Image (cartoon, rainbow, N blue to C red):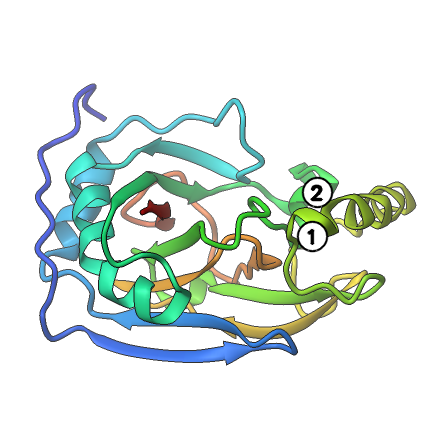
Amino acid sequence: MTTEPISFTPRFNAAARISARRIGREQQPLLIIDDVLENPQDMVAFAASARFAQPEKSAYPGLNATAPVRYGQALAEALRPLMHQGFGLPLKGTLRFFSFMGLTTLKPEDMQSIQRIPHFDSPDPYRLAVVHYFCEPAFGGTGFFRHQASGFETVTEDRVALFDQHAGREVRQGVPEIYTGLKTPYYEPLDKVDAAFNRLVVYRNNCFHAALLGGAPLSDDPRKGRLTVNSFISAED
């Protein structure tokens, strides 16, 4: 791989297919967009030229690389009306975003316990998580869950302490060395979005979620592996 990635300018597809639904008892919004980019293969080529490494301050089960800045900025602007309509983010104001490319590479026996159960990213309900798949359906999609002991489907500031009590005990009790799936202990599955090349899914980052890895062999080659671009977007008035 080269030391400097090739250039990449995203071209968003005006004819992208958009669908939305609500999940669980809490009726959390879930947005799915297909055929997002006109040039998705250019993102794969960019990833193939990038330098991936193990993240230092993340529980991501694999390798990360810096996403194109133009992608994150353009994505946030393109999603702004949908984020306002579906998730209540302000229609105007400063957008804050962070994006990275991810390659899932770890086998379940090489993961920490917390990497084999669903998680939430932060308790802020107005910080949205975005996963853009650049891989085929065989690599699996994203699942959404309810925590059985607490009944929580999301974690807000007032729920953090109680959830932490349950989660700490559950991790000490043990988590099977298998990927997160429909039979993951301590959690009940609510819904899932299958992976599809050039599909994007948006949800609140405080929802319990996890990658549902399929049967395809994992790879550290972006052209062959479970490549996604993962973003967090929030807005301020």
* Residue 114, disc: 2
The picture places residue 224, in percent across and down from the top left corner, at: 33, 50
At horizontal 25% and vertical 59% (from top left) the residue drawn is 91
Examine the image and state in which quarter residue 221 appears.
Answer: top left
Amino acid under disc 1: Ile
Determine which residue is flagged by label 1: 117
Mark 1, residues whose alpha carbon is within 10 Å: few (<14), some, or many (≥20)?
A: many
Task: Give the total of numbered labels.
Answer: 2
The picture places residue 184, in percent across and down from the top left corner, at: 74, 62
Q: Looking at the image, is 53 positioned above or below residue 131?
A: above
Hey, which residue is sitting farthest front in the picture?
237
SS at mark 2 in the image: helix
Hey, which residue is sitting farthest top in the picture?
3
Amino acid under disc 2: Ile
Specify whether 127 is left or right of 121.
Answer: left
Q: Nearer the viewer, residue 170 or 106?
A: 170
Query: How much space separates mark 2 and mark 1, taking CA atoms?
Result: 6 Å
The picture places residue 146, in percent across and down from the top left corner, at: 70, 67
* Residue 94, disc: none
Specify whether 202 is left or right of 184.
Answer: left
Q: Are marks 2 and 1 in contact (CB under 8 Å)?
A: yes
